Image (cartoon, helix red, strand yellow):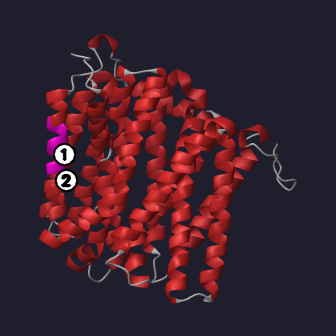
Amino acid sequence: MSKKRLPIAEFVALMAMLFSMVAFSIDSMLPGLPDIARDLSPDRPNLAQLVVTSFVLGLGLGSTVTGPLSDSFGRRKIVIGGMALFVLGSVLAYLAPTLEVLLLARLLQGLGVAGPRIAPLAMVRDLYEGRRMAQITSFVTTVFMLVPALAPSLGTLIISAGGWRAIFLVFIGFAGIAGTWLLIRQGETLPPERRRRLGVVDLRESFVVVISNKTARIALFALSLEFGALVALLSSTQPIYAQVFDRADSFPLWFAATALVAAVGTILNARLVMGLGMRRLIFWAFAGQMVVSILAAAVFQSGVLTGDSAFFLWFAWSASLLFGVGMIMGNLSALALQPLGHVAGMAASVISALSTIIGVVIAVPIGQAFNGSPLPLIVSVAFLTGAALVLLLRHLPADATGVEPPAFIDNN
């Protein structure tokens, strides 16, 4: 059991590769949705969007136990075990004869990738602390941000060369490289004497603590609404680019641009949060998302814009949504965990799992409502962000949002 530290550059690259498996497994699939719909659900093409949401659902379910398992058995075992399940799901997806089997395979992939999603952050905490830990985490996040920008283009190249099923072979290779790198170069970071007993009672108690704490509960619900909006956008964005605006070929480039806007939001948040506070930024980001969504919905409903003008409005709206995500997600997660320091590890798993699962439940009907127009998605996002905003105003005290609640809201 060695806690020997790799050179920082190599450690950052390894952790970023592990952590990026989630984004790569989602975003590289987006260009393949039309081909999957053609081959496996030609009569109901919207069902192909479930390839995204089933994966995210598995991720949420897996996140429930990944943290506690890594605390009990060690980080490396959970990462490698998760990768093995991810590879099994990839093989099943490659061979899937029906959409139902493909969705089951994607669920398995999501369950497996929860290991590489959760455990690397714990490994960083095992080896570093304080400002050095924050620096390492920032480096990992910066590298990770490049994945959503590049994955759709890579997915397009893979599909062009070998069809949509070939993407799953690349997933297997990706997991094999990352897993081998981890086994050869990085020792276990959690020694036996620091491991915790795994108990269902502990997880249940953490769940009760999260739900019973008002600030954590409200932040969790708001986080779920935002995550639902994000997953709905991810599952609907390729059909909208292709079917509404006839830009299937250039979709990877436009999606890369929106991903970079999201990265700007995250970077800007890191610069502003120390001065303005995370709660004020959350409030104003939700308000901005709601207002922009209402305005965009009104313009699309009026039909005043067509052609390129309508497309650039769609692009600006989707980019603004992702920019807001970059300002909201990390702050809301931190807000939810702030009063739960005594059970932070278990609480993090509970919050991650619940927000992901609830977000998927919200996103699925929104994606299935796609009717050849971006309007259902935009209206849904306006409702979700507005609901989150009202939730924060109504149930958190004034100093939690950074502004006084409007007079018409009863804050008792």
Q: Is residue 364 left or right of residue 338?
A: left
Residue in view at x 50 percent, y 88 percent:
307
Q: Where is residue 133 in the image (x, y as percent from the top left)?
A: 43, 26
- Quadrant hosting residue 150: bottom left
Q: Residue 201 carries which label?
A: none
**Residue 261 or residue 50, whichever sits in front:** 261
Please, what is the dominant secondary structure of the magenta stretch? Answer: helix
Tag 2 residue: 171
Start and end of the magenta stretch? 173-180
Q: What residue type is labelled 1?
A: Ala
Residue 122's x, y, as percent? 37, 28
Q: Could you tell me how far apart the alpha carbons at marks 2 and 1 are, in whole angstroms?
A: 6 Å
**Is residue 408 placed above or below 269 in the rendered structure?**
below
Q: Quadrant of the N terminus?
A: top left
| Mark 1 residue crowding within 10 angstroms, few (<14) / some (14–19) / many (20+) | many
12 left or right, relative to 223: left
Residue 65 visible in the snapshot: yes
Give the labeled residue for mark 1. 175
* Callout 2 secondary element: helix
Q: Is residue 204 visible?
A: no
Image location of residue 194, percent across then percent down: 34, 13
Q: Image check: 246 left or right of 294?
A: left
100 or 136, which lies in front? Answer: 136
The amino acid type of the residue labelled 2 equals Phe
Mark 2 in CB contact with mark 1 (< 8 angstroms): yes
Q: Is mark 1 on a helix, strand or loop?
A: helix
